[in-house]
Each structure stands twice: as structure tokens, then as C-alpha cells.
Amino acid sequence: MDVYGLIGNPVGHSLSPPMHEAAYDALGLDARYVTFEPDEDAAVDAVAGADALGVAGLNVTVPFKRDVAAAVETDDLASAVGAVNTLDFSGETVTGHNTDVEGAVRALREQADAKLEGSTAVVVGAGGAGRAVAFGLADAGASVRVANRTVERAESLAADVSRAVDGATVGARGLDDLVGALADADVLVNATSVGMEEDETPVPAAALHGGLVVLDAVYAPLETRLLRDATAAGARTVDGAWMLLYQGAAAFERWTDEPAPVDAMNDALRNGLSQ
């Protein structure tokens, strides 16, 4: 039996186990997905322990994505992003990858038919999710505007993306400039947690328009205030569960070398969210 899992703190709320278990069941794989919750200063030791125990693959969530990145052999994309959310133990060394990037890009393309190459995209938030989304959109050929409460942090991310992605056009804005930033934009991604705990949005409704595709990385609730406002403005919307699904599917495919059964995974994910 192959063992896969998730390390984070906390992990009790995670929907990754039912999503991955549904994939194993759909393909008849002899595998299980478990969760690990090491102390916040023990991520590196936890990875070494998983390697010694023969774990085949791990997802990584907060607060360990940066700590783990410094302790394994990361691919170019994960190195540029500065965060790892997927570990592969199949080689001689443990390798680190970032499937959040693919999760966001695939959600936009497959759920809203977004044409990213040559588009203008606004990413709200410059934290871990914002970094992954900004790198993914720039790599897909979009011109990216990073908007963040602290402009200096947005500027730092913009500079990192510009250095890492050949030909990237990346700028930085404050949140007070979202109306201007979105006026001619094609894509908007909320990569903050605003809207998760309370019925709030980081984007003024007046800034939204019918030419946008809007992805909210928040998936609990599925219908955030931002998505409601975007729908009212005539925009196409994508809920955060799609990003979660596709990053999980990318990890599954890396580990198993099998096409992910996304329908089965999606059903399990949305069933979990409805409970």
C-alpha cells in the first residue's frame, strides 16, 4: 500500500483526505491519504521522518510551505515562488513542487474559458497564495498587477516575478487603486482570506464589470460576497474549490503517474464542503 498525506498545523479541517481517497477508489489504487500535524518548529524533521517511513508523497499547507522549501530539492517554479505544497519521495532525494500555480491557472481556463495569454490580470494579495497565482498568470502570458494593502510587499512580489519569468510585465498597486487597476482588466483573483470569516470583500463592487473573469481563492463559503458582486456585475466567476481541486489533481498525477479522476475528486470535495 502506498501512503500519501498532508502536513500542516492545523489539518483537522482539511478536505484533502476525502478528495484523494476518492481518487484512489475511482482508479482502484492500493493507497491511503493521512494527515500529520507536527509542531510548528518540526516541519523539517517531519519530512525526514516521512521519508524514513516510506511515505510516497505529501502535500504541505500552512505554516510549513516556506520551511519545507528550504529543506528539499525544489524545482525551478517552487524555488521562484518560494513555497512548496507538494513533496515527492520517489527519487533519490525528496523533491518539492508548487501545484497551487497550476491549480489557479487550470481553474480559470477550464471553469471560465479564460484566455490568459495577452490578458491583463489583477491579483489581490501578496502572501503565499498571491505569490503562486502571480507567478502562474505571468508564466501563462498575462500582464499582472499585484494589489496589496502594503504596497511595498506588492512591489517585492512584482520584482520577484519579473526576475523569474522571461518577458513578464508585472506592476504593483495599493488596494485603494483597485478601481483603476480593474478598469481595463480581464481577470481578477482574490488571493487573500477576506470573505472566509465574514461576509466581506477586498474589492469594491463598483470596480467590477462584465468583462472580468473572477476567481476567489476562498472556498468556505463557496459563494463569497466578491463572487456575488461579480455575478451582479455580469462577470464570469470561479469559486475557490476549483483551485483546491486542480492543485490536488496535479499532486495526484505527479505521485501516481495516472490521470487524476477529477470528477470523483470534485464530488468528494464539494460533498465535504456541504457538511
Image (tube, helix red, strand yellow):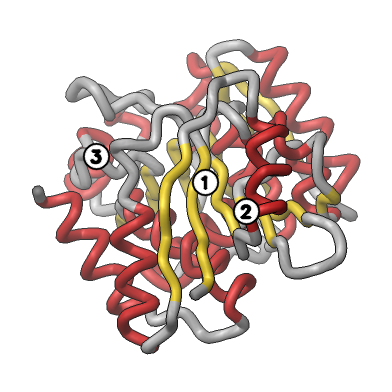
In-front residue for pair 144/60: 60
The alpha-carbon separation of the residues under discs 1 and 3 comes to: 26 Å
Q: Residues within 10 Å of mark 2 (few under 14, many from 20)?
A: many
- Mark 3 lies on a secondary structure that is loop
Residue 84, percent from left and from top: 67, 44
The alpha-carbon separation of the residues under discs 2 and 3 comes to: 22 Å
- Mark 1 lies on a secondary structure that is loop
Horizontally, residue 170 falls left or right of residue 231, namely right
The alpha-carbon separation of the residues under discs 2 and 1 comes to: 31 Å
- Counting residues from the start of the chain, the first of labels 2 and 1 encountered is 2
User: Relative to residue 166, is residue 27 depicted above or below?
Assistant: below
What is the quadrant of residue 92 in the picture?
bottom right
- Residue at image position (46%, 44%) is 188
Q: Nearer the viewer, mark 2 or mark 1?
A: 2
- Residue at image position (75%, 32%) is 158
What is the quadrant of residue 54 in the picture?
bottom right
Q: Nearer the viewer, mark 2 or mark 3?
A: 2
- Residue at image position (65%, 14%) is 151
- Residue at image position (43%, 37%) is 190
User: Relative to residue 25, is residue 98 depicted above or below?
Assistant: above
Residue 225, percent from left and from top: 21, 33
Residue type, numbered disc 3: Ala
Q: Are marks 2 and 3 in contact (CB under 8 Å)?
A: no
Residue type, numbered disc 2: Thr
Say which residue label 3 marks. 220
Say which residue label 1 marks. 185
In-front residue for pair 95/135: 95
Say which residue label 2 marks. 86
In-front residue for pair 108/60: 60
- Counting residues from the start of the chain, the first of labels 2 and 3 encountered is 2
Residue 170, percent from left and from top: 74, 39
